[in-house]
Amino acid sequence: MTDQPPAPYAGPQRVLSGVQPSGNLHLGNYLGALVKFARLQHEIETFIFVADLHAITVWQDPAKLKDQVREIAAAYLATGLDPKVATIFAQSAVPAHAELAWVFNCVARLGWLDRMTQFKDKAGKHKERESVGLYTYPVLQAADILVYKATHVPVGEDQKQHLELTRDIAQKFNNDFSAPGFFPLPEPVTQGPGARVMSLRDGSAKMSKSDPSEYSRINLTDDADAIAQKVRKARTDAEPLPETSEGLESRPEARNLVGIYAALAGVSEAQVLAEYAGQGFGAFKPKLADLAVDKLGPIGGEMRRLLADPAEIDRILGAGAERANAVARPTLAEVKKLVGYWAG
């Protein structure tokens, strides 16, 4: 007997992604995810959610969580997502995510989760003190994706392993319940240039909202003065910019700033170096600051405008939740029938 290839999925093409509401979004989130969301919505049916179920795998202040959800939604809107085109919603407003996750908890194998490196990285030496949710959240991620039968998922390097888990769960479900092609095996949408933006204070560390230094990142809510000041204070070295990318290999801070410039300008690293080769950072940083202010300043202004009207953000999230539920409920109903649940 030979192994047969999995039956192909014949449903519509969809993309799904989400961001946790656990702090300020920054330049790395913008270049690594948000600009991609805005582009994808015009190419494929798009579902973008605020991952508030995932957020509580670590402690969140309940008094702040709702506002943090609104802030992520405002960032989606300010960076170009159109609620008339993309479905924008809060994860917790679609109960099928959590219900499907339970079914998948019973499909996934313990050994699969034991191999997930992100839990090991986050838990460190004290994993017994972490929540069960932090351990099992890759299963919830699989439910997030498959409840919409999403075929494509934007991923960075740190999420590729989780997407492989989603594919394993989908294939095992299809096999276990004799439903070939029921769930798709979603494909990654790689982030492309500018996806991995590093700290402005340490070119070897990823830009992060958890870094205690405000000068390590540019927040999307920063005004023009703050953006320019952070660029001016970014760590660099004393050497001029080289003519080729090879000259940046042992210069992480220089590579980071060149990469940020290239991503914001929509050009290649080589094109940036062709223009600025031989110049020092005293000349390059002001140009980068002007570019960053030009691209990010309007986003911060629009976010502040949107956040001043939380009722409008809630209206958009509510409408998105209705659309998301209309897609998720039938999938969950089919799953319940396949599993054999009592339907009354």
Image (cartoon, rainbow, N blue to C red):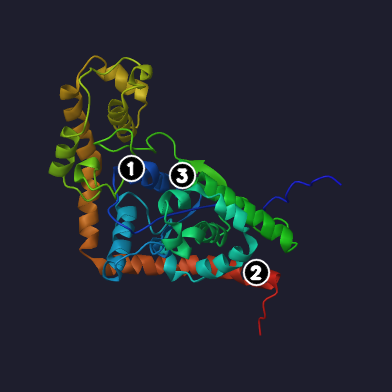
* Residue found at x 31% / y 68%: 66
Indicate the amino acid at tag 3: Asp
Quadrant showing the C terminus: bottom right
Q: Can residue 90 be seen in this view?
A: yes
Quarter assignment of residue 36: top left
Q: Is residue 76 above or below residue 289?
A: below
* Residue found at x 87% / y 47%: 1
Q: How far apart are marks 3 and 2 (CA)?
A: 32 Å
Q: What element carries label 3?
A: helix
Q: Residue 158 carries which label?
A: 3
Q: Is mark 1 on a helix, strand or loop?
A: helix
Q: In this view, does 298 lie above or below 243?
A: below
Q: Nearer the viewer, mark 3 or mark 2?
A: 3
Q: Which of 60 and 338 is in front in this view?
A: 60
Quarter assignment of residue 230: top left
* Residue found at x 54% / y 61%: 143
Q: Nearer the viewer, mark 2 or mark 1?
A: 1
Relative placement, left or right, of 344 versus 162 is: right
Q: Position of residue 116 (x, y in %)?
A: 53, 50
Circle 2 crowding by C-alpha within 10 Å: few under 14, some 14–19, many from 20 = few
Q: Which mark is residue 178?
A: none
Q: Can residue 130 be seen in this view?
A: no
Residue assigned mark 2: 334
Residue assigned mark 1: 28
**Chain-order first, disc 2 or disc 1:** 1
Q: Where is residue 67 in the image (x, y as percent from the top left)?
A: 27, 65
**Chain-order first, disc 3 or disc 2:** 3
